[in-house]
Structure formats: C-alpha cells, structure tokens
Image (cartoon, rainbow, N blue to C red):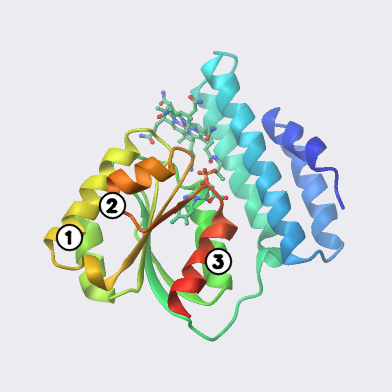
Amino acid sequence: MLDLNVLTEAVGELEEEKVLDLLNKFVATNPSEEDARTVVNACQKGMAIVGDLFEKNEYFVGDLIFAGELLTAAIDTLKPVLGRDTSKVIGKMVIATVEGDLHDIGKNIFKSMAEAAGFEVHDLGIDVSAEAFVEKIKEVQPQIVGMSGVLTLALDSMKVTVDAIKDAGLRNSVKIVIGGNPVTEDACKQIGADAFTVNAAEGVKLCQGWVN
Ligand code: B12
C-alpha cells in the first residue's frame, strides 16, 4: 500500500509528476475498492493543504486552478479501481454543483462512485440554478437529488434549491443529500436536506440505503 502521508503532501505541494507516479504504481497493484477510497481521502486532505496555503497567501488563484487539474488527473488515474461498473441500474439521481459555485471535483468523484454502484446519474454540471434542478427532477423523476458546493455561499443556494423543490410539490418524491466541504449537520437542518456528507463513499452508501 502506498504511503498516504507522502501522497497527501505531494498533492499539497502540487507535485504533479510525483502524485501521478504514486497513483499509477498503486493502481498497478490491483487494489481493492476500499483501499482506492482511502487514497481518494488522502488526495482530499492534500487539497485542504492547498486551501490553507491559499488562505495564507502562499498560493494564488493560478495554484488553485492547477490543483483542480491535478486532482482531476489523479481521480482519472484511480477510476479503474474506484468501482466496477455494474450494468444493473439500482436507482436514478440528479446531481449538480449549486448556483454560484464552480467547484466540481468532489461532485465528479461522487458521480463516478455512484455510477460504479449502479446509479443512473444525471449530472447538470456547475453553477446550476434552482429552476434547472426542478426542471430536471420533473423530467427524470429520480429517487435522489445530490447537491454539491464548497463555497460558504453554496449553503444559501442549497437552501434556495430545496425550497424551490418544495414549492414545485416535488419534495416528498425525492431524498436530498448535500455534499462538499462546508456542509454540517446544522446546515443540513437549515437547508432542509435529508442527509449530508463530506465523503463521497459515505454518500454512496447512504444513497444505496435509500433505494434498497
Ligand atoms: C481546487 C479549488 C478551486 C478550483 C476548482 C476547480 C474545480 N474544477 O473544481 C478553482 C480554481 C476553479 C477555484 C476557484 C475559486 N475558489 Co477554490 N478551492 C479549491 C480547493 C483548493 C480544493 C477544492 C476541492 O476540489 N477539494 C477536494 C474535493 C475532493 O473535496 P470536496 O469538494 O469536499 O468533495 C468531497 C466531499 O465533500 C464529497 N462531495 C462533494 N460534493 C458532493 C456531493 C454529493 C451529493 C455527495 C454525496 C458528496 C459530495 O465527495 C468528495 C470526495 O470525498 C479548495 C480548498 C478546500 N479546502 O477545499 C478551495 C476553496 C474552496 N476555494 C476558495 C475560493 C475563495 C475560491 C475563489 C473565490 C478564488 C478566487 N479568488 O477566484 C474561486 C471561486 C469560484 C466559484 N465561484 O466557485 C475557498 C472558499 C472559501 C469559502 N469559505 O467560501 C477555498 C476553501 C480555499 C480557501 N481556503 O480559501 N477553487
């Protein structure tokens, strides 16, 4: 098993070559899904280091952009071992990053894992309005709606979106899960979601529980 601390540090220091080299070697050992998920968590911790250094003015927006590209490449490398695609559809979900927020790495990780678990995932992308969520829910009739956001302001957009779902008379037909760095139990209650998580694997387990 690869040294997770070394990986976290390499992500934090934006050492692309080292990160991809570590991950390629890891994938070549044909690891379990469980181990692959631990590796995703280590990458996530590395992104928290990037965020801290950005706050301390040691990194700049360009570094955030590079970090985003680095993590996307890292997750692409891990995809083959993150879950084996199943042909059986166990449920439908509509997901997106909420209005005002352009961060999509966490959402994309959750999407990959949910698809591997057998969900048909309709991904609306980033900066998605409450109206667009409502329209897609009407069209697809999913059992689950997933909202992602990492900016603090995303919490407000999540509330607006849940309210719009209620106003459209759709709240009782869907379970709602929110994810991303700022979500907490309190925020979940305020927003009126059914569940929250800062861990994609945990989110998938929750969703599996809802459709079983
Ligand atoms: C990379 C990055 C960017 C990239 C994003 C690239 C991309 N394609 O996503 C770019 C350069 C675009 C960017 C832009 C900005 N960013 Co930025 N960014 C980051 C950074 C470093 C990492 C985010 C990330 O990918 N984390 C890793 C992923 C894997 O974690 P995650 O999102 O939490 O996802 C996991 C779980 O939460 C869960 N999950 C996520 N979504 C969902 C959804 C569901 C349904 C479920 C079940 C689970 C789930 O699964 C994932 C895997 O376990 C963070 C720092 C940090 N600490 O997060 C700052 C950070 C989020 N950014 C910040 C800021 C300030 C900005 C900018 C305003 C900078 C600027 N001055 O322009 C802009 C805002 C643009 C906008 N309107 O959104 C601040 C936010 C502050 C705040 N409290 O609001 C942070 C915290 C940095 C900091 N410490 O200051 N950023």
Marking on residue 205: 3
Q: Is residue 17 above or below residue 76?
A: above
What percent of the width, then of the height, locates residue 85?
61, 76
Q: Furthest-bottom residue in view? A: 88
Residue at the disc numbered 1: 166
> How crowded is the residue under tag 2: few (<14 C-alpha within 10 Å), some, or many (20+)?
some
Q: Which one is in front, 45 or 62?
A: 45
Q: Is residue 49 above or below residue 181?
A: above
* Residue sitting at x 70%, y 35%: 11
What percent of the width, then of the height, locates residue 115?
53, 70
**SS label for mark 3:** helix
Q: CA distance from mark 2 to mark 3?
A: 20 Å
Q: For ligand 1, tell me if the residue under mark 1 lies within 8 Å.
A: no
**SS label for mark 1:** helix
Q: For ligand 1, tell me if the residue under mark 2 lies within 8 Å.
A: no
Q: Furthest-top residue in view? A: 57
* Residue sitting at x 22%, y 58%: 132
Q: Quadrant of residue 6?
A: top right
Identity, as a three-letter code, of the amino acid under mark 1: Lys
Tell me: 27 left or right of 190. Answer: right
Identity, as a three-letter code, of the amino acid under mark 2: Gly
**SS label for mark 2:** loop
Q: Comparing marks 1 and 2, which lies closer to the viewer?
A: 2
N-term-proximal mark, 3 vs 1: 1
Residue at the disc numbered 2: 192
- Residues at circles 1 and 2 in contact by the CB criterion of under 8 Å: yes
What percent of the width, then of the height, locates residue 37?
68, 56
Can residue 23 be seen here? The reply is yes
> How crowded is the residue under tag 1: few (<14 C-alpha within 10 Å), some, or many (20+)?
some
